[in-house]
């Protein structure tokens, strides 16, 4: 069932403003090459943040910031499992997010960096997560 803006109690102006803000959030999220690489990595399933970090070669805090931006835009969701945080492509994206992901897929699937990341990911997936995500000292 699809509800219109009127049925949700929103005026046309409010609905348009919210849609525009969502488009801007998605555009900002996809304006960084590393965030596009993260989205590409997540196409085949969920990954923990340590696995993403290992493929991209970025600091954990940088990966976390990128994932937060993608999550805010509604492109990615996360779940905690024990001490690991797993991220995946949002299984219930908005129509705007779905269209953006479809558009992105058309242009990145054969990109040299994306293909290299997929190769690196296979190596990372064969590694022990305890080695990828060591516990902080003192815990």
Image (cartoon, rainbow, N blue to C red):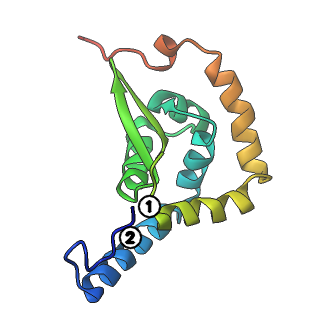
Could you tell me which residue is drawn at 56 percent across and 52 percent down?
34
**Residue in the picture at 69% in, 22% down:** 123
Left or right relative to 57: residue 50: left
Vertical position of residue 123 compared to residue 1: above or below: above
Residue identified by numbered label 1: 94
Q: CA distance from mark 1 to mark 2?
A: 9 Å
Count of marks placed on residues: 2
Residue 76 screen position, x and y as percent? 45, 48
> Badge 2: how crowded within 10 Å, few (<14), some, or many (20+)?
some
Query: In terms of secondary structure, where does tag 2 sit?
Result: helix
Where the C terminus falls, by quadrant? top left
**Is disc 1 in contact with disc 2, using a CB cutoff of under 8 Å?**
yes
Q: Label 2: which residue?
A: 22
Q: Label 1: how many residues lie within 10 Å, few (<14), some (14-19) or many (20+)?
A: some
The percent coordinates of residue 127 (x first, y second) are 61, 15
Q: Is residue 138 left or right of residue 80?
A: left
**Residue 31, position as x, y percentages in the image:** 53, 66
Q: Is residue 138 above or below residue 55?
A: above
Q: Secondary structure at mark 1?
A: loop
């Amino acid at each position: 069932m699809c509800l219109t803006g009127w049925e949700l109690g929103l005026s046309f102006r409010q609905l348009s403003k919210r849609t525009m803000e969502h488009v801007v959030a998605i555009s900002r999220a996809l304006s960084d090459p590393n965030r596009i690489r993260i989205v590409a990595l997540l196409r085949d399933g969920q990954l923990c943040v340590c696995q993403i970090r290992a493929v991209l070669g970025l600091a954990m805090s940088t990966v976390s910031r990128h994932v937060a931006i993608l999550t805010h835009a509604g492109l990615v969701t996360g779940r905690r499992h024990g001490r690991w945080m797993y991220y995946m492509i949002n299984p219930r994206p908005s129509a705007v997010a779905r269209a953006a992901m479809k558009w992105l897929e058309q242009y990145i699937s054969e990109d040299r960096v994306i293909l290299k990341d997929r190769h690196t990911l296979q190596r990372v997936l064969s590694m022990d997560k305890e080695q990828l995500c060591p516990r902080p000292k003192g815990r």
